[in-house]
């Protein structure tokens, strides 16, 4: 599969130059001079997805390996429950205990397992593991400490950059939506301009009405008062 | 605009609130001046009389030295027909043409914008197609993000940042 991996994606990194264009952020060892375009990313991801999750991958017999959250159930701190279940049909509940104890006794009697100062490693280690696994506080504290370290790494390496990419894309979409909305102003401009022309025509018409009225009134009033009038004085009458 | 077919206007149908909402942020000042001009036109129209004002000829008839003149004036005033102004410079046609032009440009613009929006949407979909971090081995991670992987042609010192690497021209921690 390594040979089948498309060399152009790695090649550009190796050459260290400008096959890549402007980028969104992913934490990188070689960040500042090597920017990767969206198109390159899409192609890389499509190819890698097709290899890891594509038709050649047998997901049924070889599912994606994951780390289980809890270890399998154990008896006495270290012995898996599955061994007890395996022996139960033949030897019942006490079978594994008898086997273990008998085995220990036999090894001691044959001096295979000698009780010297190396011997005590086993019981002491066993007791340590038992206490650590079964103590109410110790297990959770340690697992929390390890989990926090993992979470930090996950956040920095994966979640944060991916969210930055997503936020950038969403901001871009919002901006583009706003641009489309702004094109509506063309309609309003058209209406405003049309109305501007119409209102000017209307104003001219009304001005003509006003002038006609004033001229007639001027002549009438000047005839009544036998004087010459102009429009200004007319407004006072 | 045929003279005689008078299209009377007295109110503005432009939705200024909506116009202000869709106006680009850098053009609100222009919009303000446009509205001011528009309001000036409307105000001018409203200060002038809508129809030919009436003249009370009866009172003048009583006071005129020549009553027959009042009758003549009354008849002539009633028969008065003022022609509606003609749009000599053909501004309305120009406005229509500008509108057609603008709408064509809007169409191509919106198509471009939507193509770019489609690109962004496909990229978002591709991001969602990545496996979860818990399901990724380090090998997978390095294939998905090759720039983060160790590159034997350009090995780096910890902390693997560009500015701390000796091959970087900006490196300044010893010279």
Image (spheres, rainbow, N blue to C red):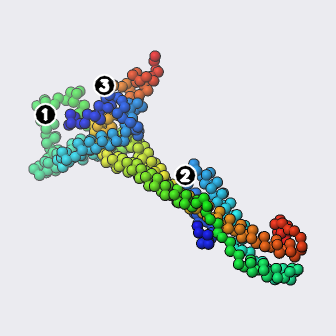
Count the numbered circles shown. 3
Observer-nearest residue: A94 or B111?
A: B111
Marks 3 and 1 belong to one chain: no
Q: Residue at x 42, y 31 (%)?
A: A32
Q: What whole-number distance in Å separates the C-alpha atoms at marks 3 and 2?
A: 50 Å
- Identify which residue, B143 or A131, lies in the foreground: B143
Name the residue beneath numbered marker 3: B153
SS type, badge 3: loop
Disc 2 chain ID = B
Q: Are marks 3 and 1 in contact (CB under 8 Å)?
A: no
A20 on left or right of A49:
right
Q: Residue at the location (36% across, 35% down)?
A: A20
* Labels 2, 1: one chain: no
Dot 1 corresponds to which residue?
A: A107
Chain hosting mark 1: A
Is residue A6 rendered to the left or right of residue B116?
A: left
Q: Subunit of mark 3?
A: B
Residue A90 vs residue A165, the one in the foreground: A165
């Amino acid at each position: 599969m390594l040979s089948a991996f498309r060399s152009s994606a790695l090649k550009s990194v190796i050459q260290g130059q400008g096959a890549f264009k402007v980028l969104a952020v992913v934490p990188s060892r070689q960040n500042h001079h090597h920017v990767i375009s969206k198109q390159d990313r899409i192609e890389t991801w499509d190819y890698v997805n097709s290899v890891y999750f594509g038709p050649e991958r047998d997901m049924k017999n070889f599912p994606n390996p994951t780390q289980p959250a809890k270890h399998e159930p154990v008896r006495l701190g270290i012995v898996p429950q599955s061994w007890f279940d395996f022996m139960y049909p033949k030897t019942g509940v006490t079978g594994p205990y008898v086997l273990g104890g008998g085995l220990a006794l036999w090894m001691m009697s044959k001096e295979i397992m000698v009780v010297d100062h190396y011997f005590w490693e086993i019981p002491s280690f066993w007791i340590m593991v038992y206490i650590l696994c079964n103590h109410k506080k110790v297990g959770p504290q340690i697992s929390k400490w390890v989990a926090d370290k993992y979470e930090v790494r996950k956040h920095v390496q994966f979640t944060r950059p991916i969210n930055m990419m997503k936020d950038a894309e969403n901001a871009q979409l919002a901006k583009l939506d706003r641009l489309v909305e702004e094109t509506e102003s063309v309609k309003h401009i058209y209406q405003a301009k049309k109305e501007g022309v119409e209102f000017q025509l209307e104003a001219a018409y009304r001005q003509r009405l006003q002038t006609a009225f004033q001229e007639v009134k001027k002549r009438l009033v000047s005839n009544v008062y036998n004087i010459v009038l102009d429009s200004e004085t007319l407004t006072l009458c | 605009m045929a003279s005689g077919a008078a299209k009377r206007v007295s109110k503005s149908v432009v939705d200024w609130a909506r116009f202000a909402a869709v106006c680009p942020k850098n053009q609100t000042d222009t919009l303000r001046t446009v509205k001011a001009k528009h309001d000036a036109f409307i105000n001018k129209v409203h200060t002038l009389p809508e129809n030919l004002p009436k003249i009370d000829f009866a009172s003048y008839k009583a006071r005129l030295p020549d009553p027959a003149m009042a009758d003549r004036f009354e008849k002539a005033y009633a028969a008065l027909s003022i022609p509606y102004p003609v749009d000599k410079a053909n501004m309305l046609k120009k406005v229509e043409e500008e509108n057609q032009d603008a709408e064509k440009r809007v169409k191509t613009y919106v198509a471009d914008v939507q193509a770019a929006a489609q690109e962004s949407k496909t990229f978002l979909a591709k991001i969602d197609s990545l496996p979860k971090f818990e399901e990724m081995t380090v090998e997978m991670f390095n294939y998905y993000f090759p720039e983060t992987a160790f590159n034997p042609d350009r090995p780096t010192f910890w902390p693997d940042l560009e500015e701390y690497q000796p091959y970087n021209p900006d490196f300044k921690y010893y010279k």
